[in-house]
Image (tube, coloured by chain):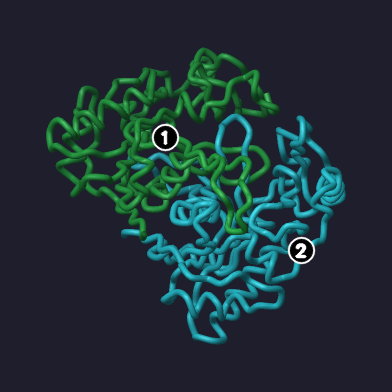
Chain colours: A cyan, B green
Amino acid sequence: MTISVIPVAGLPQVQPGDLLADLLLAHASIRNGDVVVITQKVVSKAENRLEAVDPDDPLAHKAIVERESVRVLRRRGDLIVSETAHGFVCANAGVDLSNVERGQVALLPLDADRSARRIRDGIRATAGLAVGVIISDTFGRPWRRGLTDVALGCAGVAAVVDLRGTQDTYGRELLVTEVAVADEIASAAELVMGKSSGVAAAIVRGVDPAWLREGSVRAEIVRRYDEDLFR
Amino acid sequence: MTISVIPVAGLPQVQPGDLLADLLLAHASIRNGDVVVITQKVVSKAENRLEAVDPDDPLAHKAIVERESVRVLRRRGDLIVSETAHGFVCANAGVDLSNVERGQVALLPLDADRSARRIRDGIRATAGLAVGVIISDTFGRPWRRGLTDVALGCAGVAAVVDLRGTQDTYGRELLVTEVAVADEIASAAELVMGKSSGVAAAIVRGVDPAWLREGSVRAEIVRRYDEDLFR
């Protein structure tokens, strides 16, 4: 089955309190079974996760990064790689200056799974459509250069699909194949977004219907500190 | 612009010496500007990167993993996370028992960028089509559960797209946004493949034509040991 990744063009600059479900329905032809991917920045604005920061004080941003970090893994120059209260490991605790007004920073949503559920429920309530929703963000990673989009939160779609016990094409049992489909869908969506094109959402159409179950990035993808070989 | 991710169904079990460009052209309607994603396992078989291993000796596989590793990062139980000669960091040095015949393991291609160039050149020579090619594999990562597909090699498509200097929607310069599009395309392709469905290739249609330049995973994505905060 072919999967289509469709950019959602024309979303306005989002303001605190805006109902993202209604904005998405107004700017995209959403269908049952679609997965709607929307970037964290837009969600943080709608949820008023913005904070004033003195744009002429280089330490002001850093102070917020420190506050949003529960564990600093690495520092180099201006870069801090740290773990957030959500359990995400990323640069600058996800505190971001780009694509917000000067004098503001955007913080991560308090609970991105909940943010996704709210959008999913809004689309269902307004339009009667059953969709998955993924909140995406752009993270770096060790060992490989370049950033990729990953899922911060999801609703109505699995975060991880467990293929353990499924046989390979030679009939042997695959011991461990847990695929992080929410991250892969977020990456696919990024291909039609780009950081500077002003496209902050995309529809991913045609994913395996079996994946459209209740999902949670926090429960399925976030690796516990004490289970991680690399923290 | 919408991106389509189209599974390539019906590829036969590949044998050493098979011409993958011809097999792909026979089983997919490839167009100019497409990116063809094919899994490492198929490429390793075509390139005869298979090695006999005693299936009843649990240490035989491990010995090959040790030999294919230039640096072991972590061990836990049967799992070895190590760096390969190519600079990839992955489980078991990419030495894989699944989807190969019993008594064999598949090693990574010697140079997956070159593997991709060979397929790209073959498609151009046989059909006159200009395409990108990505060799994909399934890797774990620190901090997040679940596996995602990444690019081991590419040709005719960028590995990383550099958005540095592009302005954000507020007109500020984005300082660093290097997007690993080859990894994101590999992840998108995985959504129509799955580990056990027997689909080992996909066409990704509609990517930004500016990305269809010469690319290299080794040159653009593999992070040098001495530039890595996490090795």
Residue depicted at x 52% and y 20%: B84
**Alpha carbon of mark 2 to alpha carbon of mark 1: how far?**
48 Å
Q: Pointer 2: what residue?
A: A50
Please tell me if label 2 and label 1 are on a single chain: no
Label at residue B168: none
Q: Is B172 displayed left or right of B100 in the figure?
A: right
Residue depicted at x 47% and y 63%: A202
Q: Pointer 1: what residue?
A: B98
Indicate the position of residue B83 as horizontal and vertical percent values: 57, 21
Q: Mark 2 falls within which chain?
A: A
Q: Is residue B222 above or below residue B198?
A: above
The three-letter code of the residue at mark 2 reads Leu
Q: Secondary structure at mark 1?
A: loop
Q: Secondary structure at mark 2?
A: strand
Residue depicted at x 53% and y 53%: A196
Residue A89 visible in the snapshot: yes
Q: Quadrant of the C terminus of chain B?
A: top right
Seen from the viewer's position, the closer of residues B195 and B85 is B85
Indicate the position of residue A197 as horizontal and vertical percent values: 49, 56
